[in-house]
Image: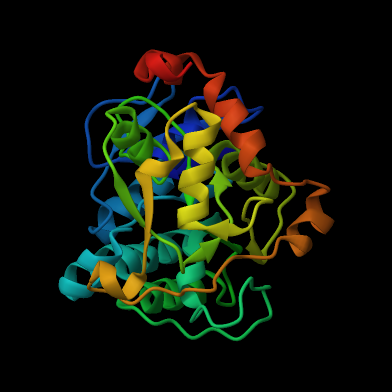
């Protein structure tokens, strides 16, 4: 199986490219630097001709599209940019994949829900509160249209560590708490943190089995962001009392968030026979990584 991965330099993109999956994994992105020893192609995904040319050249069995603008507040403020990256690019990829008979796997989000009655299953009604969530929902429709071998995987609260990737909801608190600084974390946003390598493994396996349609993947632990950060502090021997609760309303974020969110994974588990890791299991995996130990030597 040959797979083209967009967003090759991000946390998920690199998690797909760096392990030794039993597949030919090829990266692409805006940067010029390859990821590890994998084949890599620089590309401007906003150019439909460049997208078609790359897919035609590589001739993958699947494209896994991980590139996105995930800064929810920036999406609310700069809506034209958000639309270009989170919807128009998906339309370019879908057009190329449909014409060339290639499968397209798209990452989506729990932000397609309003957060009133989570955790959610795939058949629950959507009602996005933010521009980011609205664009992601529209992009799902693009990928699941007739005539395209499409797969949509909704996920949330992605965490893990790879060098030179952006901080996430685990690595950022560890940096701050490791300096002995206090953190205010919202205690009214619920979700299930997702270990990035679970997500990468599931995506590859779904493509290998030629699975199509809509699925959810979230970790096995359901809790608030405040509870998550306190558990993180305790796991790594930091002071949990440095973590102070606040509310989403007090945080003053530009984009509204779904509060009682989360994703149910039973449909995916029944298809793959796969159970996602709990938070404690994911943190154990994280703590055992050599790259993480080098980046956070005082915690290991």
Quadrant of the image containing the N terminus: top right
Q: Is residue 64 above or below residue 79?
A: above
Closer-to-camera residue (7/185): 185
Q: Quadrant of residue 139?
A: bottom left
152 horizontally vs 225: left or right: right
Which residue ends up furthest to the front in the rendered image? 241
Viewer-proximal residue among 250 and 28: 250
Image location of residue 264, percent across then percent down: 69, 65
Q: Is residue 31 above or below residue 127?
A: above
From the top left corner, tell me how far across and down residue 296 is, in percent.
38, 20
Residue displayed at 39% across by 73% down: 257
Query: Considering depth in this image, is 23 or 67 the residue closer to the camera?
Result: 67
Q: Is residue 127 above or below residue 93?
A: below
Whether residue 37 is visible, yes or no, is no
Give coordinates of residue 17: x percent, y percent.
Answer: 48, 30
79 sits to left or right of 278 = left
């Amino acid at each position: 199986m040959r797979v083209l991965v967009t967003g090759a330099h991000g946390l998920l993109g690199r998690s797909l490219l760096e392990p030794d999956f039993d597949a030919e994994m090829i990266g692409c992105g805006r940067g010029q630097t390859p990821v590890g020893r994998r084949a890599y192609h620089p590309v401007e995904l906003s150019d439909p001709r460049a997208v078609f040319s790359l897919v035609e050249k590589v001739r993958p069995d699947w494209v896994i599209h991980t590139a996105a603008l995930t800064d929810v507040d920036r999406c609310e403020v700069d809506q034209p940019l958000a639309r270009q990256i989170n919807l128009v690019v998906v339309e370019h990829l879908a057009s190329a994949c449909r014409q060339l008979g290639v499968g397209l796997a798209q990452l989506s989000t729990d932000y397609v829900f309003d957060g009133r009655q989570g955790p959610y299953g795939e058949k629950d009604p959507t009602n996005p509160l933010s521009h980011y969530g609205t664009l992601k929902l529209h992009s799902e429709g693009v990928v699941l249209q007739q005539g395209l071998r499409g797969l949509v995987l909704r996920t949330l609260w992605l965490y893990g560590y790879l060098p030179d990737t952006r901080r996430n909801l685990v690595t950022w608190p560890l940096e701050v708490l490791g300096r002995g600084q206090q953190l205010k974390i919202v205690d009214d946003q619920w979700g299930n943190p997702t270990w990035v390598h679970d997500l990468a493994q599931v995506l590859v396996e779904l493509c290998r089995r030629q699975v199509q349609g809509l699925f959810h993947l979230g970790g096995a632990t359901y809790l608030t962001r405040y509870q998550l950060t306190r558990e993180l502090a305790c796991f790594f021997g930091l002071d949990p009392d440095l973590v102070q609760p606040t509310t989403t309303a007090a945080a003053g974020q530009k984009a509204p968030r779904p509060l009682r969110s989360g994703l149910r994974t039973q449909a995916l588990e029944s298809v793959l026979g796969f159970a996602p890791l709990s938070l404690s299991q994911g943190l154990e995996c994280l703590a055992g990584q050599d790259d993480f130990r080098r980046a956070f030597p005082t915690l290991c």
